[in-house]
Image: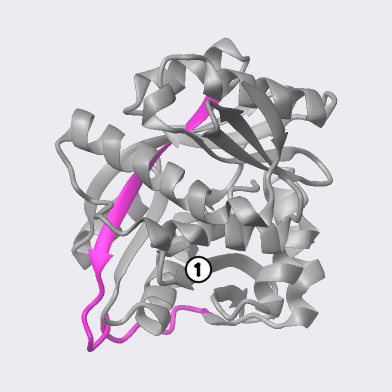
């Protein structure tokens, strides 16, 4: 088997590979059919990742087909590791480990960050053996937002609004100050929304000071909240409700919240959200602690 960079001609096969890896694992381990039968929707991953970070994906070939894929996101302060998938036919043959070792080598000593399933002990073992240290536990929450929305949000001293390109530097500096990571490229891409699927909102205090931001992806293949960050749980909850109400009416929404944020978790339950899975936020190297109320995401997994 050999490693090489991903090509656009691989997108359909990569979509099938990712779908097969996820669908098989969830079926065999959780008795769940949550990923359905339509692998074409998973083209969202190579298409949207390539739009954000061209050339930042590695595949492994074996026996005339793709055995695995990994996406990565080089940033100013760290590298983010995106989805890592192994074709079910190649399970147990070290494909994911070899792909991860390649990304670690390319990172050249930069800290790496990833979000991985806490329920998949095989991936947990792989990442911890490679030096990743879990820092935070996240609850995956799902909710079908009613067509009529989630109700009126009380004016509580700050407002939530759609972001503009003029907000980019403020958002970048806000995240750097609170969480110690910098990823200007992401916010320019998400707020610019050239793909037509990205959303980005910010929370501002009465004096105009930035209190938080929350993004979302609205693609037929993936609808999810994040990335996001807030100064406290009150702001996080207000911002979450506002973005769900504005963007997800009539749709299923998925988002991750820190399990240690009990107030926010209770608010999510109060809206009718239910748990779907648990994930871990892990860092390899001397990465900054994950400060603030963080909403990680699988699209893009850059922070």
Which residue in the protein does label 1 denote? 217
Outermost residue to the front: 64
> To which quarter of the image does residue 52 belong?
bottom right
Count residues near mark 1 (Cα–Cα under 10 Å), then give few for <14, some for 14-19, many for 20+: many
149 magenta-colored: yes
Q: Is residue 155 above or below residue 88?
A: below
Residue 249 position, x and y percent, is: 30, 82
The answer to whether residue 235 of the structure is visible from this angle is yes
Q: Is residue 66 magenta?
A: no
- Rendering coords of residue 29 (x, y %): 21, 28
Q: Residue at x 36, y 19 (%)?
A: 121
Q: Nearer the viewer, residue 99 or 175?
A: 99
Where residue 275 appears, x then y in whole percent? Answer: 23, 47
Image quarter in which the N terminus is found = top right
Residue 95 to residue 193: above or below: above
Magenta range:
134-158
Tell whether 62 sits left or right of 263.
right
Q: Quadrant of residue 8?
A: bottom right
Residue 79: % across, % down: 73, 38
């Amino acid at each position: 088997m050999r490693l090489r960079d991903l090509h656009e001609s691989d997108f359909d096969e990569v979509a099938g590979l990712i779908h097969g890896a996820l669908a098989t694992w969830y079926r065999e381990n959780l008795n769940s059919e949550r990923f359905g039968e339509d692998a074409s929707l998973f083209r969202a991953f190579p298409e949207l990742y390539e739009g954000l970070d061209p050339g930042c994906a590695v595949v492994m070939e074996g026996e005339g087909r793709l055995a695995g894929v990994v996406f990565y996101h080089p940033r100013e302060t760290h590298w983010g590791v995106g989805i890592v998938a192994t074709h079910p036919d190649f399970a147990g043959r070290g494909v994911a480990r070899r792909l991860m070792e390649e990304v670690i080598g390319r990172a050249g000593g930069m800290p790496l960050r990833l979000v991985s399933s806490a329920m998949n002990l095989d991936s947990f073992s792989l990442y911890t053996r490679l030096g990743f240290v879990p820092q935070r536990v996240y609850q995956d929450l799902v909710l079908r937002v009613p067509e009529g929305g989630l109700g009126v949000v009380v004016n509580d001293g700050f407002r939530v609004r759609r972001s503009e390109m003029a907000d980019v530097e403020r958002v970048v500096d806000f995240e750097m100050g609170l969480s110690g990571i910098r990823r200007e490229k992401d916010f320019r891409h998400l707020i610019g929304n050239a793909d037509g699927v990205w959303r980005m909102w910010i929370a501002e205090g009465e004096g105009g000071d930035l209190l938080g931001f929350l993004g979302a992806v609205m693609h037929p293949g993936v609808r999810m909240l994040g990335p996001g960050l807030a100064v406290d749980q009150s702001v996080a909850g207000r911002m979450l409700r506002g973005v769900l109400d504005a963007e997800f009416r009539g749709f299923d929404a998925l988002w991750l919240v820190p399990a240690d944020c009990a107030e926010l978790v209770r608010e999510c339950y109060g809206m009718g959200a239910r748990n779907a899975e648990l994930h871990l936020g892990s860092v390899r190297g001397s990465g900054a602690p994950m400060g603030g109320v963080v909403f990680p995401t699988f699209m893009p997994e850059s922070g």
